[in-house]
Image (tube, coloured by chain):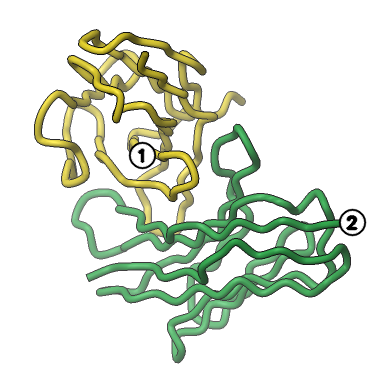
């Protein structure tokens, strides 16, 4: 009965490299959400996806960031040409997609940019 | 639109003190309401929820009542412990989306309980 699985737990990249963060939702969940949390700050919504569709990407930076949730496999949050300001914890959550059902969170990926 | 406003922290209490963390919301529809807790270095965990007016969610000694008339969902605990030190997030789920459900989170309230 695995929960939301994120990997890697920690990721170190140099400026200009690419970062790929993976999220496998809970079994049976087809809705995935990505959030960013900066130190000492709250959660910032980034993107909401359903299988093969982006439902809401209003929180995604216009450049360098992209997300997908393919028919098979995990959801991927991709950050190209990373900069120091991308250092944060990135959390993935999944849900059944009904309003009375909670989101379930993974333990996050801590991204550090050197 | 939809939004959640939480009491600003940080909050520091002595062990066995009474806790209240205020949360108010605005919503276009009839939302479900949630409290999450985040311990250091971990993701958010669901603490409790309420899906309709006057429902009371409860878990681990924490309680919150869905008050439609005051649009509030305040978190309370009668006697806090050191192990309750964490960040608490209030959230609502918007039922008016035609596909799935969008969540709106408060900014979080940091609680530290000292022995």
Residue identified by numbered label 2: B115
Checking the image for residue B78, the label placed there is: none
Question: Which chain is mark 2 on?
Answer: B
* Left or right of residue A57: residue A28: right
Which of the 4 image quarters holds residue A60? top left
Residue at 24 percent of width and 64 percent of height? B96
Instruction: Return the residue nearer the eye: B18 or B53.
Output: B18
Picture quarter with the N terminus of chain B: bottom left
Q: Nearer the viewer, residue A97 or B113?
A: B113
B18 to A54, vertically: above or below: below
Quadrant, the C terminus of chain B: bottom right
Kindly identify the residue that appears in the image at 21 percent across and 44 percent down. A59
Within 10 Å of disc 1 (Cα), the crowding (few <14, some 14-19, many 20+) is: many
- On the image, the x and y values in percent for residue A34 come to 34, 36
Pointer 1 residue: A35
The residue under the point 61% across, 71% down is B21
Q: Is mark 2 on a helix, strand or loop?
A: loop
Instruction: Please state which of residues B98 and B89 is positioned toward the viewer in this rendering.
Output: B89
Identify the colour of chain A in the image: yellow
Q: Position of residue A46 (x, y in %)?
A: 27, 40
Q: Nearer the viewer, mark 1 or mark 2?
A: 2
Q: Chain B is drawn in which colour?
A: green
Residue B63: x, y in percent? 69, 70
């Amino acid at each position: 009965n695995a929960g939301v699985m994120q990997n890697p737990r920690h990721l170190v990249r140099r400026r200009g490299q690419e970062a790929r963060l993976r999220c496998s939702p809970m079994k049976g969940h087809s809705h995935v959400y990505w959030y960013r949390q900066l130190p000492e700050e709250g959660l910032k919504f980034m993107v909401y996806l359903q299988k093969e569709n982006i439902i809401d990407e209003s929180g995604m930076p216009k450049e360098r960031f992209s997300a997908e949730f393919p028919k098979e496999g995990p959801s991927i949050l991709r950050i190209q040409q990373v900069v120091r300001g991308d250092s944060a914890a990135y959390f993935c959550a999944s849900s059944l997609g009904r309003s009375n059902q909670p989101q379930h969170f993974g333990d996050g990926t801590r991204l550090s940019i050197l | 639109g939809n939004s959640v406003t939480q009491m600003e922290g940080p909050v520091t209490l002595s062990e066995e003190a009474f806790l209240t963390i205020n949360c108010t919301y605005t919503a276009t529809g009839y939302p479900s309401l949630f409290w999450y807790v985040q311990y250091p270095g971990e993701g958010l965990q669901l603490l409790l929820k309420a899906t309709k007016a006057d429902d009371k969610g409860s878990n681990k000694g924490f309680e919150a009542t869905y008050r439609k008339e005051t649009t509030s969902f305040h978190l309370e605990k009668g006697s806090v412990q050191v192990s309750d030190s964490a960040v608490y997030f209030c959230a609502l789920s918007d039922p008016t989306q035609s596909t799935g459900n969008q969540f709106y989170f408060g900014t979080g309230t940091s609680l530290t309980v000292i022995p």
